[in-house]
């Protein structure tokens, strides 16, 4: 890609040691950046008046290191574009926050940054119930929104995959460079998002995986989005960080309730109980809160369950765990027929046998 002079300036400032987002935004708002990379000493007095002599020297050090021609070649080779906080493509939903990144490194369709977005996040270790809920909500939401998530294992991956399979668009926000695929088993999903959606990060190319980076990227996930949906999450889940960011940003947050016996839903249930979030049991709960027209939810889900399978899933969702004899009471089947159906549903990972003749989702 070919960098403009202002993009070069923002890239220089954002990559200088010790500057950071707050100081960077302060400098960018105070200085006309045209020509700063070509004649930095000319801007010394104004930079020092805004940031101080030490930060000016750090910018000078970085200016002596960076080769913009090499940077352009590197981004072009990687198929990556830089969108700075001064560019028209920078999302309006994100720029209003003081901690918005100075640069977004983008791989894919940057036009999606201007689309209405909806964040869907959750636990890395979902139950069958969590996966099903995510698939159903995302398949509907993707008709009106670009789905944003973090490409993590579990609910995030399910949200991205379902959006693409539904013919929708999705944005993956990484906690590492956009050329670093993590987790590695998501390589195919990453490639599909890069081709049909968008992968973004605030971190430069080559930035590795760091535990510190992942919580920080959650503010971008919520910041890009009109609202946030948590389909399944425990109380100590990292998803709760996204919840906190979203609430601090004034976003609408929705949680799907789960069984009181299932720790994977304890975070959602507590957030609903504490009135931190809105309850969502179907997609129209979200649309009504957002003042949008309701969707037709009478059409069958993509799972194509028959009546007995659907009754079993609903019963297990409500009860958490049920004995074979209890399940027999909610279906119109003989003992051999139910036994065969439970084996089939277990084989396709819709339900799980927990102990002798007990089942759960």
Image (cartoon, helix red, strand yellow):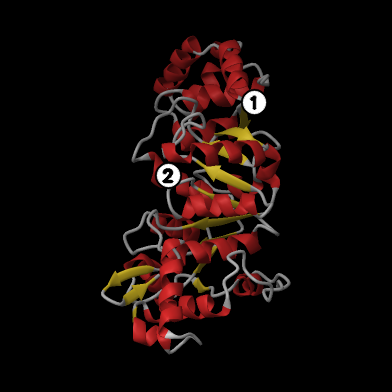
Point out the image quarter for the C terminus. Answer: bottom left
Residue denoted by label 2: 216
Question: Label 1's element?
Answer: loop
Count of numbered tags: 2
Q: Nearer the viewer, residue 321 or 113?
A: 321
Q: Position of residue 42 (x, y in %)?
A: 58, 13
Which quadrant of the structure image shows residue 38? top right
Which quadrant of the structure image shows residue 87? top right
Q: Nearer the viewer, residue 358 or 236?
A: 358
- Residue pushed farthest bottom? 329
Q: Position of residue 88 (x, y in %)?
A: 71, 37
Q: Earlier in the sequence, mark 2 or mark 1?
A: 1
Q: In the shown orientation, is residue 20 left or right of residue 73?
A: left
Point out the image quarter for the N terminus. Answer: top right
Which mark, by number, is residue 192?
none
Q: Nearer the viewer, residue 175 or 48?
A: 175
Above or below residue 86? Residue 116 is below
Question: Label 2's element?
Answer: helix
Above or below residue 315? Residue 215 is above
Residue 85 at least partly seen: no
Q: Position of residue 285 (x, y in %)?
A: 60, 75
Residue at the (37%, 54%) spot, across then down: 238
Residue at the (69%, 46%) spot, across then down: 114
Q: In the shown orientation, is residue 308 left or right of residue 6?
A: left
Above or below residue 34? Residue 202 is below
Residue denoted by label 1: 32
- Residue pushed farthest left? 356
């Amino acid at each position: 890609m070919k960098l403009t002079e202002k993009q070069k300036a923002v890239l220089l400032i954002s990559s200088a040691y010790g500057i950071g987002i707050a100081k960077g935004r302060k400098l960018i708002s105070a200085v006309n950046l045209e020509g700063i990379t070509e004649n930095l000493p000319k801007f010394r007095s104004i930079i020092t008046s805004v940031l101080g002599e030490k930060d000016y020297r750090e910018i000078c050090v970085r200016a002596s290191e960076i080769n913009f021609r090499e940077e352009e070649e590197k981004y072009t080779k990687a198929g990556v574009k830089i969108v700075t906080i001064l560019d028209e493509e920078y999302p309006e939903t994100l720029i209003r926050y003081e901690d918005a990144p100075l640069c977004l490194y983008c791989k894919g369709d940057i036009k999606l940054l201007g689309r209405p977005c909806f964040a869907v996040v959750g636990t890395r270790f979902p139950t069958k119930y969590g996966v099903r809920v995510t698939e159903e909500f995302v398949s509907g939401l993707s008709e009106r929104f670009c789905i944003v998530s973090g490409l993590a294992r579990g609910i995030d991956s399910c949200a991205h995959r379902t959006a693409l399979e539904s013919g929708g668009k999705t944005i993956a926000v990484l906690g590492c460079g956009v050329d670093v695929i993590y987790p590695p088993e998501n390589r195919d999903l990453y490639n599909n998002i890069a081709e049909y959606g968008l992968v973004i990060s605030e971190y430069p190319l080559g930035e590795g995986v760091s535990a510190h980076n992942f919580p920080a990227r959650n503010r971008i996930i919520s910041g890009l989005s009109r609202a946030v949906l948590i389909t399944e999450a425990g109380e100590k889940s990292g998803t709760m960080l996204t919840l906190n960011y979203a609430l601090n940003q004034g976003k609408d947050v929705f949680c799907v309730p789960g069984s009181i016996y299932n720790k994977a839903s304890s975070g959602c249930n507590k957030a609903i109980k504490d009135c931190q979030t809105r309850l969502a049991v179907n997609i129209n709960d979200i649309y009504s809160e957002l003042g949008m027209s309701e969707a037709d939810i009478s059409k069958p889900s993509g799972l194509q369950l028959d009546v007995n399978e659907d009754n079993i899933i609903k019963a297990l969702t409500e009860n958490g765990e049920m004995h074979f004899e209890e399940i027999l009471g909610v279906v119109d089947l003989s003992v051999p027929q139910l036994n065969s159906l439970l084996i089939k549903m277990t084989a396709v990972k819709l339900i799980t046998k927990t102990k002798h003749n007990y089942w759960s989702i």
